[in-house]
Image: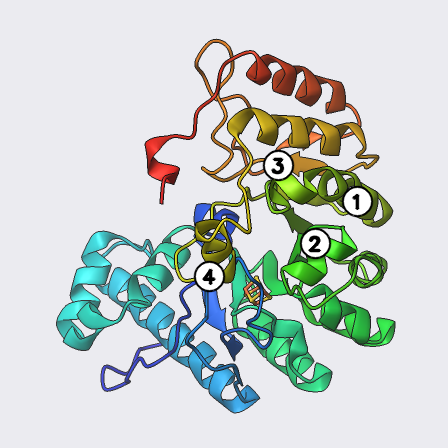
Amino acid sequence: MTADSSQTYDFEVGVYRPPSEGGSFSLLLRITRNCPWNRCAFCNMYKIEKFEVRTPEEIKADIDAIAAICNELKDISHKLGLNGRITRDTAIELINRHPELNFHHGFVMVFNWLQSGAKTAFLQDANSPIMKTDQFVDVLQYLRKTFPSLTRVTSYARSKTLSQKKLDELIAIREAGLDRLHVGLESGDDALLKKIKKGVTAEGHIKGGQKAMQAGFQLSEYWMPGLGGREMWEDHARNTARVLSAIDPHYIRSRPLFPQPGTPIHDWQICGEFEMLSPDEQLAELKLMIENLDVTSKVCFDHAANYWRNSQGGLMLSHGYEGYQFPQEKSRVLELIEDGMQAGNQVPEFLHL
Ligand code: SF4
């Protein structure tokens, strides 16, 4: 197919995606804008932005624009004698033809995605399943049909939304081509969930998580060490382990709390209402949570905020996206934490806000 050089390449890209989607150079496709809840006390992601659902027509137009960029890159590659290989030279020639792409922050993302095999896609922003099920299914089918090379499509989702959707709807979404859900659990403790305004109870987390598993999704649940502070750490650790054990997701990912300026939890910290755990207290909390965790998940620490050092001065826990396979590696993780507790950990400079 010969590309049309008068084509305009206009499509939206949101700001956020999970780190693992960057590692695999995912295509970022915006299904909704921002967060429909936007009240969590620790979160500053979409604070000043209004939530909007995009129409299937808008999203399909974005898919078409991205497909047109891919087609023109491939066309250029053949003209340059590169046999369809996507290289820097193909990108330079495309920008020569369409100088406006120099200022399009989505172009590099599409280029990297295509160059790495166009295998994975992440649907933005904070809660795609809130879209009407028939529209979401329609968009997913269109995405899969347009890009048959995709082997994995993922999205953020709120437990509350998952718990409210019918199982049949979740199965329809799964069958239309959404493979993996990233869910912010944060805590399994009801008092803490209420305090931080998560908008869901421990029971809601379990219901949403179990339903997602039943529908056949690959499920990643994120919890937040330190979220309970000195006052609530023990209930936070025990109840988070209890709720995650009831869900038994494919992945459990640790995202330790470091309060961001402009968030309520940061204000509570400044006025003394919230006390952060010390590094040793963080490790005691982590140990208690892991001891109580009864899962077959991969338990991951794939973020720089899992900063703790071991007694040799190296990283205490691997930051790999695949983490530690439980229950087989549970005792190993506990040994690593015990070792870190002997290391006299301190919060590194880059995490001081
Ligand atoms: S649901 Fe997620 S994106 Fe929305 S406010 Fe809470 S943490 Fe932030």
Tag in front: 2 or 3? 2
Whether residue 115 is visible: yes
- Residue appearing at x 43%, y 13% in the figure: 313
Dot 4: what SS?
A: loop
Tag in front: 4 or 3? 4
Q: For residue 300, what is the image quadrant?
A: top right
Dot 1: what SS?
A: helix
Q: Looking at the picture, how far across and down is residue 139, in whole percent? A: 60, 80
Q: Which class describes the residues within 10 Å of circle 3: few (<14), some (14-19), or many (20+)? A: many
Compared with residue 13, is residue 85 higher up or lower down, i.e. above or below? above
Disc 2 residue type (three-letter): Leu
* Pointer 2 or 4: first along the chain: 2
How far apart marks 4 and 3 lie (CA) works out to: 26 Å
Q: What residue does disc 4 label?
A: 263
Asked if marks 4 and 1 touch (Cβ < 8 Å), the reply is no
- Residue appearing at x 55%, y 72% in the figure: 38
Q: Looking at the picture, how far across and down is residue 140, in whole percent? A: 62, 74
Residue at the far top: name it.
312
Disc number for residue 192: 2
Disc number for residue 239: 1
